[in-house]
Amino acid sequence: MPKMKTHSGASKRFKVTGSGKIRRLQAGRKSGAAFASQPTTGSRKKQRRNAGMVTLEKADVKRAKKMLGL
């Protein structure tokens, strides 16, 4: 049986922690987020809220693990 390949899109979007949890980027960062090119869109509160990574929802963990080859 051949080796299982990792889904390249999933590998870019998900990270696995040391304890085995799957993390993803917070949604709502692309449009209206304040970056260097768009300094006036989005409040600072919204930027802080959307910053960083969050744990993947329980309903999506099984599918994400399969795509990551775990």
Image: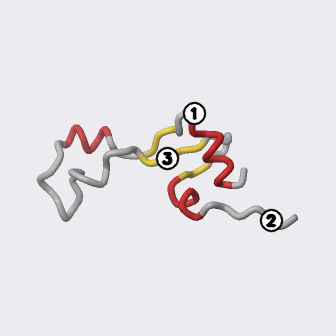
Task: From the image, state whether disc 1 or disc 3 is nearer to you.
Answer: 1
Judging by the rendered image, the residue that carries numbered circle 2 is 3
Q: Which label sits on residue 25?
A: none
**Comparing marks 3 and 2, which lies closer to the viewer?**
2
Q: Are marks 1 and 3 in contact (CB under 8 Å)?
A: no
Three-letter residue code for mark 3: Arg
Name of the residue lying farthest toward the top: 58
Mark 2 falls on what kind of element? loop
Circle 1 SS class:
helix
Local packing at callout 1 (Cα closer than 10 Å; few below 14, some 14-19, many 20+) is few
Name the residue beneath numbered marker 3: 24
| Between discs 1 and 2, the one toward the N terminus | 2
Residue at the right extreme, as displayed? 1
Q: Residues within 10 Å of mark 3 (few under 14, many from 20)?
A: some
Report the residue marked by disc 1: 59
The x and y percentages for residue 30 are 30, 54
Q: Mark 3 vs mark 2: which is more N-terminal? A: 2
User: For the residue labelled by badge 3, is the local secondary structure a helix, a strand or a loop?
Assistant: strand
Mark-to-mark CA distance, 1 and 2: 26 Å
Q: Residue furthest bottom?
A: 2
Query: 62 or 53: which is nearer to us?
Result: 62
User: Which of the image's four quarters has the N terminus?
Assistant: bottom right
Q: Nearer the viewer, residue 53 or 66?
A: 66
Amino acid identity at mark 2: Lys
At which x and y percent is residue 8? 58, 64
Query: Which of the marked residues, 1 or 3, is nearer the chain's N terminus?
Result: 3
Q: Residue at x 62, y 48 (%)?
A: 16
Per the model, the C-alpha gap separating discs 1 and 3 is 14 Å
Q: What residue occupies the far front of the structure in this picture?
A: 1
Residue in view at x 67 percent, y 42 percent? 20
User: In this picture, is 41 found above or below 59?
Assistant: below
* Looking at the image, residue 37 lies above or below residue 43: below
